[in-house]
Image: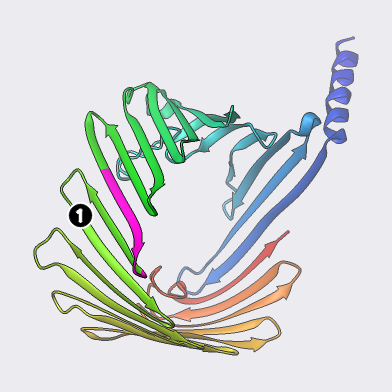
Amino acid sequence: MKSILLASASAFAFAGAAAADVSWSGTATASYNTLATTVTADVTLEAAATLAGDWTLSTSISMDETGSWSTGTISLTDGTSTLTFGDNHAFGAAGLDDEDNDPKTADLSLSTTLGGVGVTATIDAAAGGNTEVGATMSAGGADIEVGFVAAGTDAGDFRLGLSTSLAGADVAFNTSSVGGVTAWDASLGMTVAAIDLTFSTASDSTWDLGASYTMGDLTVSAGIDETPGNYTVGVDYAMGGVGVSFSTDQANAWEASVSYAEGAVAVTAAFDAGGLGAVEGSYDLGGGMVAYFGAATNNYVGLEMDLGGGASLAVSYADGAGSDDDAKNYAEGGTVGVSFDF
């Protein structure tokens, strides 16, 4: 009898799952590097099921070359309210973060809209059970954001943000208290006689004043802050496929760049007070193939090909470790990689 009941329950459960409209998508990547002398691979699957009442259930699963599986968040939403299980909301509902040294995350979150007010609540079991609540709303022409930690090791921390327009000026004010330390910052932006002006200040007595003026293809900018003699001046010019940029400061630490983009060719050269900084460019070979080259943080060349159907192939060589500041941050050594979106 037990087996019959279990079979009946299983059939009922799978019948409900089959009735749902389930969609799949994902990515698969694999690459080989001559210095690493190993193949790295990663596969990510994302699934979404449409349920009754316009609700959608979604999740993701990833696997790497070692065979290790990891699961992403599991979310249930109807477009207005969302319930999420798993690491999410990098700053928690309160929107607080101690300069990335104590990031607020969440193991469980719920967000919804009530009477035009967006409300989010999160719980992070790993951070002493922090329970955070946040809300966003518009009132009297102002956008308001509030958040506080209602319970847990960081109980009492809060954040308040206000932004609005007054007499043609954009005004913003934010204040927060983290671990009993309260701080604030404010900013103002407005245009006077075609000159864009910005001003910002904070509770640590720092401030910054900036101005920019655009006339056709030419933009001139300048800024100064609380440090005596600290200033920056910049000029940007763009016409057709040519772009020129130059900036300097009180220490004469100038930087300049020249770029050209026309048809299949794109090249950028950067200079600074120390000399030539980098030259990077690309050439569209047609047929979905683009060649890249650069002498930047490292010297590199690469060829990337769109194979169609969501697939691509990339071949590259770099003589050193790259940087995110480079146009292409290729891995050191020779690399061959493929990727596929489905």
Task: Say if 30 sits above or below 335 in the image.
Answer: above
Coloring basis for residues:
rainbow
The x and y percentages for residue 282 are 53, 85
- Foreground residue among 32 and 280: 280
Residue at point 42%, 39% (across, down): 91
Query: Which residue is at the far left?
Result: 228
Q: Name the residue tied to disc 1.
A: 207
Q: Please state the horizontal and vertical placement of residue 209, each as a whole percent of the image.
A: 23, 61
Q: Amino acid at mark 1?
A: Trp
**Residue at 49% in and 39% down:** 89
Taking the image as shown, residue 301 lies to the left or right of residue 23, namely left
Q: Residue at x 66, y 40 (%)?
A: 59
- Give 144 or 320, whichever is nearer the viewer: 144
User: Along the line of sight, which residue is nearer the eye, 104 or 55?
Assistant: 55
Q: Is 188 part of what is drawn in magenta? A: yes
Instruction: Please say if 155 is above or below 192.
Output: above
296 lies above or below 105: below
Q: Secondary structure at mark 1?
A: strand
Query: In which quarter of the view is residue 48 placed?
Result: top right
Q: Residues within 10 Å of mark 1 (few under 14, many from 20)?
A: some
Give the prevailing secondary structure in the magenta stretch.
strand
Look at the image and give the residue range highlighted in magenta: 185-194
- Residue 318: percent from left, percent from top: 44, 79
Tell me which corner region of the image, top left, top right, bottom left or bottom right, holds residue 129: top left
Is residue 332 something that shows in the picture? yes
Does 137 appear above or below 12? below
The quarter of the picture where the C terminus appears is bottom right
Residue 295 visible? The answer is no
Question: Which residue sits at x=37%, y=79%?
Answer: 298
Residue 326 located within the stretch drawn in magenta? no
